[in-house]
Amino acid sequence: MQMQKEKKYQTQISMLMVVHFFIFAAVILFHVMPVQCEEAISDISSPGMNKSLTQESTPVLVLSKAVICGEIKGFEPADPAVVFSISLGKIFCFTGFENISQNAFIYHKWFHRDRFIATNRFLVKTPRWSTFSTMQLRVADKGPWRVEITDDKDNLLKTLRFSVSD
């Protein structure tokens, strides 16, 4: 009886060692494999190419319109201004892009009195795209604001400054 328990225990330990070996082998394989694949891809790229297939190209974004406004009508900004009444209840940051070379992400980063409030992330698509974000206004939101419009690499495309008052 004791011998059967020891044999069963040894079998369980052996199985556990095999499982650990396969996990270890899988971890090593997944760390080495992507490097080998990237090297293979760059080896087959033609000498006339400007960059290897593994590099990402930076999309070209042409910001054609950027405004803070009181509302959006028919997918266009309405009532643009630099001073907004708190009684509006909310304001909008509208951005329009043209000549987009490839789909990309842009960000609207909202600041009140130089204090970060929120970030909105948007996918803009080829060949042109527009989008907007909104900010609810409360009594405590009076004062200077800005929205920084940036690309996915945090390059500043434009800063919009405005104020909220009574």
Image (cartoon, rainbow, N blue to C red):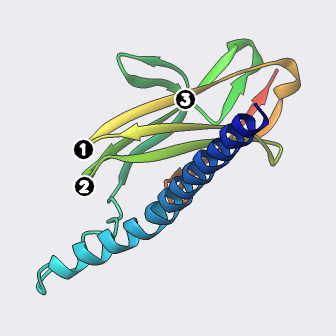
Tell me the kind of residue under disc 2: Ser
Task: Please tell me how crowded label 3 is: few (under 14), some (14-19), or many (20+) other residues with Cα within 10 Å.
Answer: some
Give the mark nearer the N terminus: 2 vs 3.
Answer: 2
The earlier-in-sequence mark between 1 and 3 is 1
Q: The disc labelled 3 sits on which kind of residue?
A: Ser
Amino acid tagged 1: Thr
Q: Residue at x 24, y 44 (%)?
A: 126
* Residue at numbered disc 1: 126
Please indicate, yes or no, whether residue 74 appears anywhere in the rendered image.
yes
**Separation (CA) of disc 1 from disc 3:** 20 Å
Q: Position of residue 97 (x, y in %)?
A: 34, 45
Q: Name above or below for residue 74 compared with residue 41.
A: above
The picture places residue 55, in percent across and down from the top left corner, at: 33, 70
In this rendering, the label closer to the viewer, 1 or 3: 1
Badge 2 element: loop
Q: Which residue is mark 2?
A: 101
For image coordinates 32% across by 66% down, the residue present is 57
Circle 2 or circle 3, nearest the eye: 2
**Residue linked to disc 3:** 133
The alpha-carbon separation of the residues under discs 1 and 2 comes to 6 Å
Q: Camera-side residue: 46 or 120?
A: 46
Residue 137's x, y, as percent? Answer: 74, 20
